[in-house]
C-alpha cells in the first residue's frame, strides 16, 4: 500500500517528490438518487457513478467503497471476472477495461465503485489498524492510501504523439518538480469548506490538451547539480554533443514529463524549443538554475483536439521552477516575464478566489463547460487554478462537455 505522503530523502540536495494521482482508493458514499432509465447515481466525495438501480442498491450513504477513477485500466484477471464481457480495450498488449466518462440520462458518470467486502485484504488491513490506533484514525489513514499497485490497476495512457519520440538519454532530473494537479472532484471539500481556501487567490488559466514539456538551464557555476542529470555524451551514431545542449554559460536541456532528450535533429520537443526561441530567451531570465515548464501542443499531439493546422506545434509556458529555491516563481512574475520576452504563455482568464468562478464543485464544472471554442476551433479542455501562495494547493477542472466530445 502506498501512502499519499512519501518519505523525504535526507540528501543535501533533496530530490523533488513528484505528484502522483491516486487512481484507486477507499471513499465514502455521500449521496444517492434515482434517475431515469432504471438507474441510480451514487456520489463518492464529489464523483458521481451511475449504474442500474438493481446493482447500486447495495451501496448506502455512509458506506466505505473502493473507487476507481476514470483512466483506470482494469486487467482481465480472475478478480474482475464479472467485467470480462466489457473488456475490449488493449493497453501495452494487455486486454482489460478502461474506465471512461459517460453520460447516462443527462448525468455524467465518472469512475467505478465496488463493495469494500470484495477486497478482503483491504478489510483485513483496516481491521488490524483499528485494533492498533482506533477506528477514526484507522479510517482516516485508509482514505489516504492508493491501492492501484496492489490491485493491479494501471493508469491508461493515451497515445500522445503521431510520430515516435527519439533521442531519450535518461530520466527527468529529480531536481525538477513534475507538475500535476488534482481534479476538483478530489479536493473540492477542502477548496470550498475551509476559510483559508475560500480566501486564497488563484491564477486561473485555460487547460491545454498537450503534453508536459520542460526546458531547463544549469549554470556552469553550479557543477554539483549536474550529478542529478543524465550524462551528456555522443549518441550511438557518433553524433557529437550539439551547442544547443552545452553552451558557454552552462547546460541546457529539453524534457517531457518522464525523460530528457538528446538534440538529434528529429526530436519533436527539441524542434519546438528551437522554433519557439526559448533556447535563447531562457538565458535572459535572471535566475541561475531554472526549468521552464509548459505544454507541447499542436497537430501531432493528443489527437489534435485543439485543431491546430497540420505541422504546427507550440511550447506554451505555465510555470518556472527555481531549482535553487526548490519552488515555483510567482504566477504573475512568470506571466510578466513571458510578456516581456515574447514567450507564449497559457491564456490567463483572471485572478481571484475560487468563489469568483463557482461556489461549489457543480457550479465550477458548469463554468468550465461554458468556455467555448479555442483559438483554432477546438473545444477548450477546462481550467487550471494555481494558488499564488502554494502551487500544491492548485487544482484542475475538466469540462464534462470536452470529455464527452473527445472520448477521453
Image (tube, helix red, strand yellow):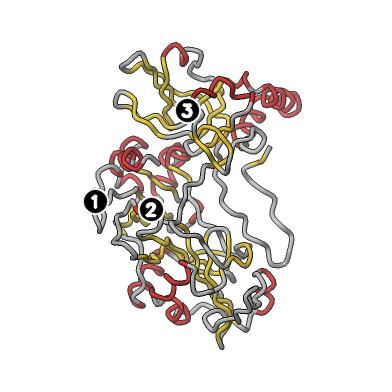
Q: Is residue 124 found left or right of 404 in the rendered image?
A: right
Could you tell me which secondary element the residue under label 1 belongs to?
Answer: loop
Q: Quadrant of residue 13?
A: bottom right
Q: Earlier in the sequence, mark 2 or mark 1?
A: 2
Q: Earlier in the sequence, mark 1 or mark 3?
A: 3
**Residue 209, labelled with which disc?**
2
Q: Nearer the viewer, mark 1 or mark 3?
A: 1
Mark 1 Cα within 10 Å, few/some/many (few <14, many 20+)? Answer: few
Is residue 359 in view from this perspective?
no
**Residue 278, how many percent across, how many down?**
43, 75
Q: x%, y% of residue 36?
A: 30, 17
Q: Nearer the viewer, residue 258 or 94?
A: 94
Task: Say above or below: 342 vs 357.
Answer: below
The residue mark sitting in front, 3 or 2, is: 2
Q: Alpha carbon of mark 1 to alpha carbon of mark 3: how far?
A: 31 Å
Crowding around mark 3 (Cα neighbors within 10 Å: few <14, some 14 to 19, many 20+) is: many
Q: Which mark is residue 365?
A: none
Mark 3, residue position: 44
Q: Which residue is mark 1?
A: 373
Amino acid at each position: 500500500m502506498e501512502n499519499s505522503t512519501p518519505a523525504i530523502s535526507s540528501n543535501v540536495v533533496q530530490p523533488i517528490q513528484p505528484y502522483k494521482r491516486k487512481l484507486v482508493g477507499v471513499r465514502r458514499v455521500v449521496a444517492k438518487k434515482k434517475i431515469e432509465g432504471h438507474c441510480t447515481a451514487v456520489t463518492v466525495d464529489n464523483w458521481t457513478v451511475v449504474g442500474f438501480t438493481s446493482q447500486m442498491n447495495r451501496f448506502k450513504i455512509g458506506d466505505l467503497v473502493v473507487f476507481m477513477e476514470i483512466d483506470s485500466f482494469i486487467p482481465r484477471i480472475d478478480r474482475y471476472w464479472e467485467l470480462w464481457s466489457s473488456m475490449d480495450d488493449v493497453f501495452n498488449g494487455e486486454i482489460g477495461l478502461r474506465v471512461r466518462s459517460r453520460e447516462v440520462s443527462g448525468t455524467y458518470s465518472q469512475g467505478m465503485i465496488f463493495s469494500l467486502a470484495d477486497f478482503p485484504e483491504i478489510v483485513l488491513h483496516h481491521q488490524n489498524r483499528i485494533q492498533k490506533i482506533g477506528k477514526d484514525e484507522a479510517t482516516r489513514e485508509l482514505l489516504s492510501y492508493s491501492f492501484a499497485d496492489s490491485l493491479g490497476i494501471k493508469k491508461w495512457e493515451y497515445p500522445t504523439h503521431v510520430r515516435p519520440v527519439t533521442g531519450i538519454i535518461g530520466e527527468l532530473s529529480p531536481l525538477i518538480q513534475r507538475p500535476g494537479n488534482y481534479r476538483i472532484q478530489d479536493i473540492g471539500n477542502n477548496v470550498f469548506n475551509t476559510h483559508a481556501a475560500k480566501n486564497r487567490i488563484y491564477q486561473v488559466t485555460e487547460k491545454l490538451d498537450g503534453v508536459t514539456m520542460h526546458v531547463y538551464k544549469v549554470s556552469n557555476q553550479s557543477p554539483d547539480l549536474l550529478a542529478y542529470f543524465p550524462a551528456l555524451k555522443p549518441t550511438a551514431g557518433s553524433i557529437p554533443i550539439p551547442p544547443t545542449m552545452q553552451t558557454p554559460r552552462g547546460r541546457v536541456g529539453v524534457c517531457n514529463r518522464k525523460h530528457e532528450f538528446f538534440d538529434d535533429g528529429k526530436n519533436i520537443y527539441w524542434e519546438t524549443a528551437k522554433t519557439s526561441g526559448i533556447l535563447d530567451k531562457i538565458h535572459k531570465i535572471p535566475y541561475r538554475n531554472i526549468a521552464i515548464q509548459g505544454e507541447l501542443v499542436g497537430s501531432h499531439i493528443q489527437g489534435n483536439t485543439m485543431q491546430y493546422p497540420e505541422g504546427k506545434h507550440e511550447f506554451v509556458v505555465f510555470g518556472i521552477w527555481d531549482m535553487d529555491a526548490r519552488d515555483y516563481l510567482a504566477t504573475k512574475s512568470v506571466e510578466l516575464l513571458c510578456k516581456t520576452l515574447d514567450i507564449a504563455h497559457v491564456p490567463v482568464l483572471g485572478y481571484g478566489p475560487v468563489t469568483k468562478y463557482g461556489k461549489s464543485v457543480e457550479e465550477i464544472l458548469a463554468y468550465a463547460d461554458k468556455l467555448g471554442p479555442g483559438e483554432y476551433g477546438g473545444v477548450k479542455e477546462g481550467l487550471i487554478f494555481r494558488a499564488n501562495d502554494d502551487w500544491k494547493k492548485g487544482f484542475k477542472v475538466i469540462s464534462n462537455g470536452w470529455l464527452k466530445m473527445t472520448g477521453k
